[in-house]
Amino acid sequence: MPPGAFSGGAQQQPQHEDDDQLNLELDEETAEGTYANLVMIAHSPEEFILDFIRMVPGVQKAKVKSRIIVTPQHARRLMDALAENIEQYERAHGEIQDPGEGNAPPGGGNPGTLPPMGFGGGAEA
């Protein structure tokens, strides 16, 4: 795996001076990012499909903002990189609270009303 791949982006540096460095091109539109507050995951034997969705409170229809398809090996690397980065974040900023644990979700609303991020994870694509 190239240094920095699924590992937190620009903050990651190669561990050794002789490691290859991955240079990324990032256009302005992509650099702005896309907000999503729900991820639905499905998989087949060959791939994992991650649909990043934006749900608006009070609206019954949600919109898929981005679909990312990765191999099972890259899904595992993504999971490991997310776990590592969440640990780093929580060391710096404190434990991330789950809205289902009595905290208001971002943007307001009733606690515990958001579907789980892994919803649909066992479905075959």
Image (cartoon, rainbow, N blue to C red):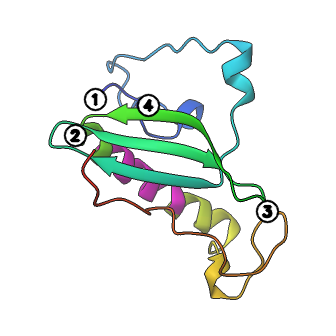
Q: Residue furthest right?
A: 108
Residue pointed to by mark 4: 4
Q: Residue at x 79, y 62 (%)?
A: 57
Q: Which is nearer the N-term, disc 3 or disc 1? A: 1
Residue pointed to by mark 2: 73
**Quarter of the image where one finds residue 102:** bottom right
Where 66 falls versus 17 (above or below)?
A: below
* SS assignment at label 2: helix
Q: Residue at x 66, y 73 (%)?
A: 94
Pointer 2 local density, CA inside 10 Å: few below 14, some 14–19, many at least 20: few
Disc 2 marks which amino acid? Answer: Gln
Q: Which is nearer the N-term, disc 1 or disc 2? A: 1
Percent x, y for residue 2? 33, 25
Percent x, y for residue 108? 85, 70
Rounded to the nearest angstrom, the CA distance separating label 4 from label 1 is: 8 Å
Numbered label attached to residue 1: 1
